[in-house]
Amino acid sequence: MLKLRRRFMGALAAAAAVMPLAAPAPASAQSAPSTLKVALHSDLKIIDPIWTSALITTNHGYMVYDTLFAVDDKLEVKPQMVDKWEVSPDKLTYTLTLRDGLEWHDGKPVTAEDCVASIKRWGARDAMGQKLMAVTSDLTAPDDKTIKFVLKQPYGLLLYSLGKPGSNVPFMMPKSVASTDPNSQITDATGSGPFIFKKDEWKPGEKAVYVKNPKYKPRPEPASGFAGGKVPKVDRIEWVWIPDTQTQVNALLGGEIDLVEMVPADLLPLLKKEKSVKVFVGNKAGRQYTMRFNVLHKPFDNAKVRLAALYALDQKEFLDANVGDPEYYKVCNSLFPCGSPLESTKGWEDKLSGNAAKAKQLLQEAGYDGTPVVMLHQTDVAGHNNLATVAKPQLEKAGFKVDLQPMDWQTLVARRAKKDAPSAGGWNVFFTSWGAVDVINPAAAAFLNASCEKATFGWPCDAEMEKLRDAYAAESDPAKQKEIAEKVQLRVLEYPTHVPLGQFTSPTAVRSNVSGMVFAPTLAMWGLEKK
């Protein structure tokens, strides 16, 4: 449903024009079983992609689950598990029919009742899911293959919501799993997707293992983005956890692993001259660095203190320290991604440029009393491990006191869900990044969800923001959507929820005997072949 400008859609589609990978070997030349070993950006410790929005868990989700709809490489919504759908003339009833032959990994058939339970659990956690469920008066499964939405009002984002590519993705799960409380983590990774998670071989801190789902029924269309035929072409994929990026690169060069998901710019020269390795950027639209506020506790319970941070922080310093090469980053004084239809600098022209004097003035006006800012600092994610260390001196220069607390990313992911006081194991700020498609509009952006207890970690509570997000979701005119988005951008200056810290892309490297890469907003591993 989203109409992206040509240059933004082209950025995603242009991924197909990157350095060509090796052609697949003839069937007679391939040996079985085949194992692909990959080094990703983080260790996998949480396997519930609804409970957390962490990218590593979303990647896991795409391995084992499927979705009702999906977006292709032009961000157009396509059916995935759905065979056909109908919309009533008054646009209040959507009837979705599942494809034939869908099975869970345990051999049981996928039913509409499973999908209804999955949608409801996702809809309780995800920003777009909450908006969809708020306009849904009835969601039922009239029979085993039919899902029926009855809406309170026309809602043009329904299909996109069910196919959204960014966290939290509406993955379908068996009813027995999807019935888990949305605020509790699932422990059963049974899905219907192209790979099966080998929980018995999962060793957090060492590896996660997936094997080909022999009963998976891919769509007949070619794979495109997250849509089309997800054909698993290797028998086994091992996610090998290697914390040090230099060691990852050395292992790739030595043939010990086959793919490195995110290569820091300073290590690219080692790979670009190596004939046995191919380097490319699969997600041309990139990602947006972000600092998230916790509004529940001092000092960021005060909106003016949060605004002071918007003035104190300097995007370029974050990008230089964490990306390094300007070829792979962009300073962007827009709440929504630069290059997207909603890009605007309105109200933000003087923000994010390290104005310590203005920040000090705002802190004085707000009556900041020196309460330390508990800053969670992830130390093990390539391209993200210098975010907190850049922010600390910038905030201190403006007059903040900062308590920097180092930890690995998965520990941070667990801790950010805690509402405890910072002095009792809670937090004030943490850093992450979102895919450009995750923050493409006010309805999709999780950090703009200001629905209090229903909001994601940070828990902003602002009725005006929610009115604007509702208005955006109900509007179909692109020009009016842009007007509403600018109002959202201005509202964030009155009630800051987070700080956008610039855009970047992450090169991926594979050995030249690996082919079939599918280019998508996050890593997709179906279609990969290894000679």
Image (spheres, rainbow, N blue to C red):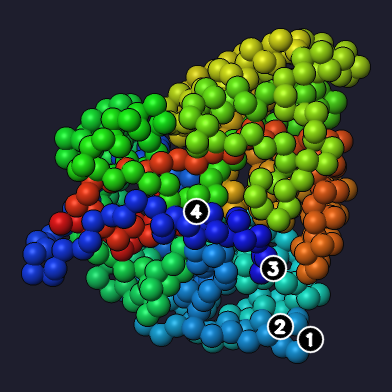
Q: Does residue 36 sit above or below 174 in this rendering? A: above
Q: Secondary structure at mark 4?
A: loop
User: In this figure, which residue is indicated by the disc labeled 1?
Assistant: 90
Q: Residue 170: give x, y in percent of width and height.
A: 55, 62
Q: Earlier in the sequence, mark 3 or mark 1?
A: 1
Q: CA distance from mark 1 to mark 4?
A: 34 Å
Instruction: Please identify the residue farthest to the right as the structure is shown.
Output: 365
Q: Does residue 526 sit above or below 200 in this rendering? A: below
* Relative horizontal placement of residue 151, taking residue 323 as reference (left or right): right
| Nearer to the camera, 105 or 248 | 248
Instruction: Please identify the residue farthest to the bottom as the structure is shown.
Output: 89
User: In this figure, which residue is indicated by the disc labeled 4?
Assistant: 521
Q: Does residue 423 sit above or below 243 in this rendering? A: above
Q: CA distance from mark 4 to mark 2?
A: 30 Å
* Relative horizontal placement of residue 418, taking residue 272 as reference (left or right): right
Q: Earlier in the sequence, mark 3 or mark 4?
A: 3
- Tell me which corner region of the image, top left, top right, bottom left or bottom right, holds residue 263: top left
Q: Does residue 174 sit above or below 321 in this rendering? A: below
User: In this figure, which residue is indicated by the disc labeled 3?
Assistant: 157
Callout 2 touching callout 1 (CB < 8 Å): yes
Number of the front mark, 3 or 4:
4
Asked if residue 474 shows in the view, the reply is no
Mark 4: which amino acid? Pro
User: In this figure, which residue is indicated by the disc labeled 2?
Assistant: 93
Number of the front mark, 1 or 4:
4
Q: Earlier in the sequence, mark 3 or mark 2?
A: 2
Q: Residue 68: give x, y in percent of width and height.
A: 52, 72
